[in-house]
Amino acid sequence: MKARLQVTVAQRSEAGVKPRNEDSLAIHIPTDNLLESKGVVVAIADGVSAAEAGREAAEIAVKGFVSDFYSTPDSWSVKQSAHKVLIALNRWLFGRGQGYLEAEKGYVTTFSSVILKSCSAYLFHVGDSRIYRRRDGVLEQLTRDHVARINADQQYLARALGIDVNLDVDFRVLDLQVGDLFLLTTDGVHGVLDYRQINQLLTSSATLDAAADQLIASALAAGSDDNLSCQLVRVDALGETTDVDVLQSLNRLPFPPELAPGMKLDGWQVIEVLHASARSQLYRVQHEQTGESAVMKTPSRNFIDDAAYIDRFIREEWVARRIDSPHVVKRVEPPAPRTFLYYLLEHIDGPTLASLIARKQPLDIARVVQIADRLAQGLRAFHRRETLHQDLKPDNVVMRGDDPVIIDFGSVHVAGVDEIATGFDRETPLGTLDYSAPEYRLQRSRTPAADQFSLALVLYELLTGQHPFGAAYARATCLRDFTNLSYVPAYRHNPLVPLWMDGALRRALQVNADLRYPSLSEFVHDLKHPNPLYLTADQRPLLEREPLRAWQLISALLLLGNLILAFLLLSG
């Protein structure tokens, strides 16, 4: 059974000594899949009495927020969903307020909300309503009042929904613990009861319902002259951690220092430095208690203030969590909470394809086909998640016995995630130029055909030790450069490569992505089974197959003809 978030709640609202209640509040606990995808929403609003439509504004804010939040796409994060809904509500309230001739008849309200999802609490706040948390007997105010004080007796609301066309909302994310108690109040309660009184009432009440009643009654007895509202939510059980929860928690971790063999981090001892660059470090580590070996990847401190870099680094681990294939390296779950930003991958003790190529001995044909089949399975695991690897190359494939394993996530592109708007420009690092498809340098759309191109190039190199287009490929930058490239058949470098296999490689290596195979499975099928179309050598005219060579030959023939003609004229 999947662990589900469980809460106990209570809420109360009274007009108090005022003729009408301008507060509004709601708690919504979904009973279906929305509990996992969206969570529990708790919202409270205090309509500003100076604005004639304050009561309506508070009701619109609470009801509209709850309704619209659960209507947002499941693919959106809690923060993205809530912010978009609040911006829309604020503009609507502000627009309604501007419809009156007198400014005091505006639609203005405070708003505070706690959204509990799996293992996290998301806080959204504007105005002077409050959110508290009581943990282990200690009461803490989590929000600050958005008020400007004129003197000891006068103050005014500086921020609220509907007060301005632009909205500035405070946002926080907190980790949840079983037993956490969240309290939301309007100023009719916390304006007359201090921390000690509120905490004492929470401690002495047998139930949350009793605590809500006592808070309202005590505030009235203390002389509250405003509407009184409170909400109580206790966490009884945590939900299952989601990918978004992991991303949120990682984003709050500090960068680790540079490590060296013998140093320890969160119980992991560094055995050796595998790789270090200006962008990241890789260490082989071993856990001092469990003895488990892993590879630790840490971010470079060069980017400690670079939001785009941090975003991409965190999403690397997120991708690793989502991809499930025996031919893709697996993420290692840390046995204890992390104190620094890093992630762990399984350690595979084997050679890379690059080291096999460096031996200058082309691999056996049957072994290359087997590697092609299994790498294609690994790439399909990415593609099923609408993710492109974008950096398949010999250095990024390690052999586990006879099985190739893709080990790097540094250049991945996730459809739908990379397009989500952020406050910064997302990094779009390309893979190694020698192995990336032409469309990357030509700024064309990215599709799985790009990974197919890289796979074919790796296989060609395994068979021949050479690049199919030679050194000119790395220098190509425009369409003309790529069009002028000349493909060298694999069998010219390695006579053992069958014609039909070279035909399959040639198709997968087309500069035009539309001319490649529609799918990786069709490419692999043609590598395993002779396609009749490729059973003979290329019969196309030389000018079409190798334009550069054809024009060189034509030029040589023209030169020879001119020399013969000149000789005949001189001899005559």
Image (tube, rainbow, N blue to C red):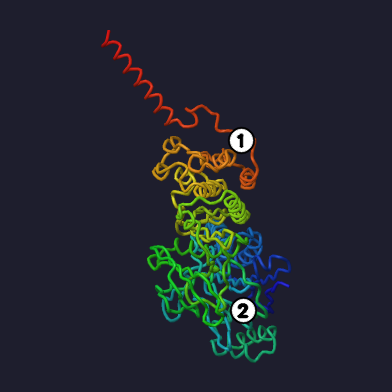
Asked whether residue 393 is in view, the answer is yes
Asked whether residue 22 is in view, the answer is no
Tell me the kind of residue under disc 2: Leu
Q: Which residue is mark 1?
A: 535
Q: Could you tell me residue 76's position as x and y percent?
A: 59, 60
Tell me the kind of residue under disc 1: Leu
Residue pushed farthest left? Answer: 570
Q: Which residue is mark 2?
A: 228
**Looking at the rendering, which quadrant does residue 406 occupy?**
bottom right
Q: Secondary structure at mark 1?
A: loop
CA neighbours of label 2 inside 10 A, class few (<14), some (14 to 19), many (20+): many
Q: Give the mark nearer the N terminus: 1 vs 2.
A: 2
Q: Could you tell me residue 236's position as x and y percent?
A: 67, 80
Left or right? Give the position of 9 relative to 169. right
User: Which residue is depicted at the point 43% across and 79% down?
Assistant: 262
CA neighbours of label 1 inside 10 A, class few (<14), some (14 to 19), many (20+): some
Q: Secondary structure at mark 2?
A: strand
Q: Is residue 102 above or below residue 234?
A: above
Left or right? Give the position of 12 relative to 451. right
Q: Could you tell me residue 71's position as x and y percent?
A: 66, 59
Residue pushed farthest top? Answer: 572
Numbered badge on residue 143:
none
User: Which residue is depicted at the point 52% across and 78% down?
Assistant: 287
User: Which residue is depicted at the point 55% across and 55% down?
Assistant: 414
Query: Which quarter of the figure is the C terminus placed in?
Result: top left
Front-most of 341 and 401? 401
Q: Is residue 400 above or below residue 197?
A: above
Total numbered labels: 2
